[in-house]
Image: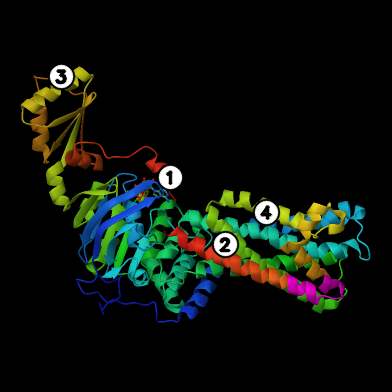
Amino acid sequence: MDEYYQGEVPGVSDAGIEVSGLAKAYGKVVALESVSFTVAAGTVCGLLGPNGSGKTTTVSILSTALRPDEGSARVCGFDVVADAAAVRSVVGLAGQFAAVDANLSGRENLALIGRLSRLGRRSARERAGELLEGFGLTEAADRLVRTYSGGMRRRLDVAAALAHRPPVLFMDEPTAGLDPESRFALWEILRQLVAGGTTVLLTTQYLEEADALADQVVIIDAGRVVEVGTPTALKARVGAVVFSLGFTDDDAAAQAAGVLAGAGHRPERDGTALRVRAAGGSAALVGVLRALEGSAPEPTSVGVREPSLDDVFLALTGKAPVTPAGRDERKRGAA
Amino acid sequence: MSTIPITAGRQSRLAMAVADTVSVAGRNLANLWRTPQALIFATIQPVMFVLLFRYAFGGAIHVPGVAYVDYLMPGIFAQSVAFGGIGTAVGLSADMASGIFTRFRTLPMSRVAVLTGRTAADLVRNLVVVAVMTGVGYAVGFRAHTGAAGLLGALGLVAVFAYAASWGFVALGLAVSDPEAAQGAGVPVVFVLVFSSAAFVPLSTMPGWLQAFGAHQPVTALVDAERALIAGGPAAGHVLACLAWSAGMLVVFAGLATRAYRRISR
Ligand SMILES: Nc1ncnc2c1ncn2[C@@H]1O[C@H](COP(=O)(O)OP(=O)(O)OP(=O)(O)O)[C@@H](O)[C@H]1O
Ligand SMILES: [Mg+2]
């Protein structure tokens, strides 16, 4: 179980993350207004939010890459500004864009990060071998990273974050751009790390991912925390599934919405489409279709899907996530 | 709290800075080595200048008391390290754009090593480029009349000067944080300094206002000192002037660069 984290497991009260009133602006652009939350040691916290909501900024501050304008944060009991050096020795960061060197091999990348993380030449090399194996990169270990696929780079990047076996791990959208298999493999690695005592803060745009991994979810929007809770509690509020029904025209959709509302459902109409959030199960779908049968136009399409982040926002705030114009213009091309 | 493994602090700060400088420099050199285009362009350009000035323009330039090729080569050494410096600025701003610096900032490593590792790697690159240019110079008839000692002294001076200057390019790369902007900003500065200096033609052939500028800028100080060392004659004054320029650039540029680097995380 202890494959990736082999340092001493810190005391429970020490390895957590405490964030209080963080604020950060880039010139005139306010990235964080005020963000507060805590993550208990040895747990996984999912930081969810739409583009530009401040996820990367939060993670950058917590991993000491950026200084906050206001507020404070402690990682493993160390202040991220005053004790930045101590924080650096206990955290690993896998950033949103794979920060690996294209002109080094996978092994050289990991050995470099290991050495810079104070492992010493020999242990850095050994650790590199271990990590390459753990992340299924042994075959490609001695190839230059510029020949790697995007998914391989991402895995290497996550591996690099684990070089010095940090008890606290920050991952900024670690599975963006990964195929399902690599995604599940990464989830498995994260679970192992957590079983070994590592505290993980991961950002994601996928409710499903937070649901699969996180003990606690913090949702931020426009630099503010809008909700904190367990994934189960969130789902209970949002509904476990979303049915989407398509109709031929607006009138038909509106008519069907009326019928469904009369039958005790809560349909949301968007043009010719309706969506109905439900607790789950086929019974609910049958119920929806029964209610429509005979009393409203036939839907032309019926879909069932997991609630997305949009659905969560809609349920929590009654509006789509705030993404002020130009917010994501700065995004670099995904590596 | 005692259970948390703090690894930083086991080494002294200096030992850590040195070790990390070596690591970062190794990484930068690997980058240079594995993108040979960059190295080739860094040498092809000065080689073309050698050919151009030796054979195309050289016949029209008369420098009293010295064969033009012997006058030219010290200028070429200065020019090749100055142009190479643009690569420093470009490489550094590319690192910043790539997110690698963000990772470096979260590692328990020496902060200054990110910059000293870059300038150390550039020192190695400059030594290689200057060695190649010396070979090219010999092939087209250049000779050091003071022998190996004079030549090595001159080349050492070029390396010292280039090291100091590369801190200026580091500061530039950090300030613009975009590889294209770094290129755009670096090229004109280098052009003006190199071509207003005594690198290719004697200052006495320039109009008065340009002479005044050319006589009081670092590239001229370097080529004057090189020529004195290579051709013989009183060199101490020139060498001192060149070292003074280098020391001044080092202090000012290293200060600017570390300040710019600290500002990134604000
Ligand atoms: N270096 C910067 N300079 C100026 N503005 C910035 C900078 N970095 C981020 N921002 C702005 O700060 C806000 C928050 O950005 P941040 O990257 O933290 O969001 P995010 O939640 O990570 O978004 P995404 O999901 O797109 O990665 C955005 O409005 C963004 O445009
Ligand atoms: Mg982000």
Contact between labelled residues 2 and 1, with CB atoms less than 8 Å apart: no
Asked if labels 4 and 2 touch by Cβ distance under 8 angstroms, the answer is no
Q: Where is residue A316 in the image (x, y as percent from the top left)?
A: 18, 42
Label 4 is placed on what type of residue? Answer: Val
- Mark pair 1, 2: CA separation: 27 Å
- Relative placement, left or right, of B41 versus A203 is right
Say yes or no: labels 3 and 1 on the same chain. yes
Mark pair 2, 4: CA separation: 25 Å
Q: Which residues, given as a range, are shown in magenta?
A: B228-241
Task: Please name the residue shown 22% across and 20% down the image.
Answer: A250
Residue tagged 4: B189
Q: Which SS class for mark 3?
A: loop
Q: Which residue is drawn at 60% across and 66% down?
A: B252
Callout 3: residue from which chain?
Answer: A
Beta carbon of the mark 1 residue lies under 8 A of ligand 1: yes
Residue at the spot 23% in from the left edge and 23% down from the top edge = A272
Q: Specify the color scheme.
A: rainbow
In the image, is residue B203 above or below residue A119?
Answer: above
Residue under disc 3 on the same chain as residue under disc 4: no
Q: In this view, does A40 lie to the left or right of A99?
A: left
Q: Earlier in the sequence, mark 3 or mark 1?
A: 3
Instruction: Indicate which disc residue B99 carries.
Output: none
Judging by the rendered image, the residue that carries numbered circle 3 is: A297
Residue under label 1:
A330
Does residue B217 appear in this view? yes
Mark 1: give few (<14), some (14-19) or many (20+) Cα within 10 Å.
Answer: few
Which element type, helix, strand or loop, lies under badge 2? helix
Which numbered disc, 3 or 1, marks the residue closer to the eye?
A: 1
Q: Is mark 3 within 8 Å of ligand 1?
A: no
| Image coordinates for residue A186, horizontal then vertical, percent | 31, 58
